[in-house]
Image (tube, rainbow, N blue to C red):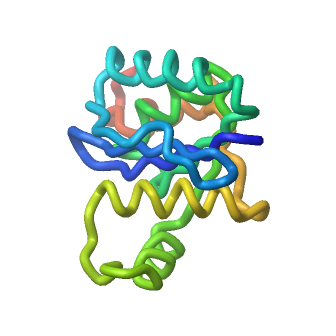
Amino acid sequence: MAVAVGIDLAKHVHWVVARTSDGTTLIDRKLDNTPGAIAELLEDLEALTHHGPVTLGIDVLGGIAGLVTAMLTAAGVGCVHVPGLAVNRARRATRGGENKSDPRDARVIADQVRMRDDLRVIEAPSEVDIDLPAAECAPAGVGV
């Protein structure tokens, strides 16, 4: 058995759902976009490994996903990208799916991770990747 986790990302508060391969929900709660809350989630995910390997899906890359992606990949959690369009289409195919909600989208993301094997793996950013945006944003003539 394995554990599929979906995080619906937002600016300040995310929603996280973890489900076993048979669809049993293990986690269904909000997740503050803070290092402390994400560290607690990492502990929770570690505790779920007795169910099998944990794979986590997110629907956004970069921006608001930066902190959670960096912390999860640095901790060795397998992360995949579930494109927002796929989440939208899958949600709309469910009862009540025309009504978007963060908890519903997190469940859809977890189910996409649970059922699909073609999702793109998210790699941990290298130090070069992290340094490039800072260099690109520096005003002309200012060293980074």
Above or below 90: residue 134: above
Residue 136 screen position, x and y as percent: 43, 39
Residue 137 place in picture, x, y as percent: 36, 38
Is residue 78 in view from this perspective?
yes
What residue sits 67% from the left and 35% below the top?
54
**Residue at the image point whose x is 41% and y is 17% from the top:** 40
| Near-viewer residue (39 or 98) | 98
Q: Is residue 117 left or right of residue 138?
A: right
**Could one spot residue 131 in this view of the protein?**
no
Q: Residue furthest left?
A: 12
> How far across and down, in percent of the image, does residue 83 sit?
53, 66
Identified at 69% across, 36% down, the residue is 78
Residue 48: x and y in percent read 61, 26
Picture quarter with the N terminus: top right
69 lies above or below 101: above
Which image quarter: residue 28? top left
Compared with 105, 41 (above or below) is above
Hey, which quadrant is residue 141 in on the image?
Answer: top left
Using the image as rendered, state which of residue 86 and residue 47 is in the foreground: 47
Q: Residue visible at 59% across and 54% down?
A: 23
| Residue closer to the observer: 95 or 16 | 95
Quadrant of the snapshot with the C terminus: top left
**60 left or right of 127 in image:** left
Counting labels gives: 0
Vertical arrangement, residue 119 with respect to residue 138, above or below = below
